[in-house]
Structures are given as structure tokens and as C-alpha cells.
Amino acid sequence: MSTATTNGAATVATRSITEVEREVWRLCHDLAARLQFHGWHHVSFVRDKAVHFARRNGSDVALVEAAALVHDVNYMVRRNSLPVDGRNLRLDILARAGVPDDVAARVDEVVEEAEMRTRHRDISPEAQALSDADTLFKALPVTPVVLAPKYLEENGITLRELAHKIVGEQRNKHDAGYYFYDPEAAATYSRWATANLELWSCIVESLDDPTVNDLLTAVS
């Protein structure tokens, strides 16, 4: 059993994080053809940024790193799925890496808390760090241009479904002022987030135009 403590509380040991990283990397490599959006490029980006935000907000850095590594394993189980769909795989990865059951349960809770669809203003600091990292990936200016087509292919959904998903899940967080929790992230990236949401809102509007739909049919 691999354990460590932070301020007397159990957290994730460095050796366990190494094992989790190795296993998630292997799965991403083996399933690379399926994980065009949620592959290792996404996992490693979110992990690095989540660790940065965790250090800034004083939360359990090791726990956040572990949560970031396993936060999207549901896409390895089923396309177009929710974090809960990856719970069994997530807990199995953590258990085989030597993470104690109670700590693994907390990692799973952080993943669920940080989920864009259901997150709220008062999630834990660990979930805030993970959320900000994952949200930043969504808000990157290159994401709609380079990565959105990969998301469509990976999850087998239409552009209309993706546009409504993004606007429906993200607009209220943006307008309520907790799109990002970290002040540095909000100050640095909110302009990108606003532009991204405006773009997807325009896409939603454009898809109500029959001529746009005819255009998309013609080029598909």
C-alpha cells in the first residue's frame, strides 16, 4: 500500500502517481485511434495546468495530479459518456497503483465535482484546480479550429449537438463569474473564454439557417 500525508491527511504517494501516469499513458497509447480529443495530449495538458493551479490555491497537489490523470478515463469505456461511466476503471487504476481506497474515493469525488456540466461556485479547492485546467483546454483559441473536429469524430455527435452542449453547459458559469476559479486564470484567459463562447453561440444561431445546413450537407 503506497501512502503519503499532507497536514496529517492521507494523500497520493509519488510512487503511486508514477504508476497511474504509466497506466493512463499506456491506455491512451493503445486507444489512440479512438481518443482523438481525450488522448494523452489532453491528459498531460490538464495534469500540468491542474498542478499549477493546485499549488496556487493551496490544495492537495498530489491528489489533484492523480485526479487529472484519471479524469477522462470514461472515454476509454464509452464514447460520449460522463465521468461516472469511468468510475470502475478509475478506481481500478488507482487501486493497482497502490492508492488506498479512501484516498481513491476522494480522487473520484474531485473528478465528479470538477465536471463542467454540474460544477458550481463552491466546489472544493482540489476540484477548482482540476476544473480550471480542463476548462482552459476547452477555452484555448486553437480548440474550436483544430480539436473540435476530433471531438466530433471521437464521440460520434453532430456539430449541432456539440454547439448546444458547449453553450448549454458553459454559458451560465461564464455569466455567473465562475468560469475560472483561480484569479490568475480568470485574468489571463477570460478573453479567450468569452470569444470561444461567442463563437459557439454564433454556430448555434447559424445552424437555424437552412442555407447553412445546405452548405454543411454539401461539404460533408
Image (cartoon, rainbow, N blue to C red):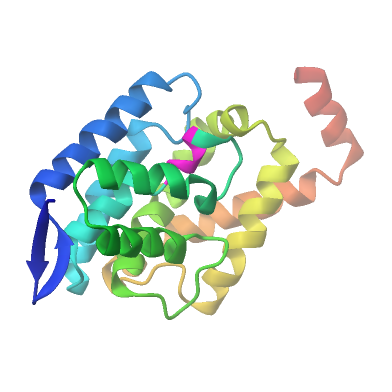
Quick one: quadrant of the C terminus? top right
Q: Residue at x 57, y 29 (%)?
A: 154
Residue that appears at 45% across and 46% down: 88
Q: Is residue 146 left or right of residue 167?
A: left
Tell me, yes or no, if residue 120 can be seen here.
Answer: yes
Callout count: 0
**Quarter of image, res 170:** bottom right
User: Height in image: 177 above or below 28?
Assistant: below
Q: Is residue 9 above or below residue 28?
A: below
Between 183 and 107, which is closer to the camera in this rendering? 107
- State the image coordinates of residue 128 (x, y, percent, origin top left): 35, 68
Quarter-of-image position of residue 44: top left
Q: What predominant SS class does the magenta segment belong to?
A: helix
Q: Residue at x 47, y 58 (%)?
A: 193
Location of residue 195 in the rendering, given as x and y in whole percent from the top left corner: 52, 55
Q: Residue at x 25, y 59 (%)?
A: 64
Q: For residue 153, which quarter of the picture?
A: top right
Report whether 174 appears left or right of 42.
Answer: right
Q: Is residue 74 magenta?
A: yes
Is 180 placed above or below 47 here?
below
Looking at the picture, tell me which residue is in the foreground, 66 or 140: 66
Residue 131 shows in the view:
no
Depth check: 3 or 182 in front? 3
Q: Is residue 218 magenta?
A: no
Residue lying furthest right: 210
Residue 108 picture location, percent across and down: 38, 58
Q: Which residues are magenta?
A: 72-76
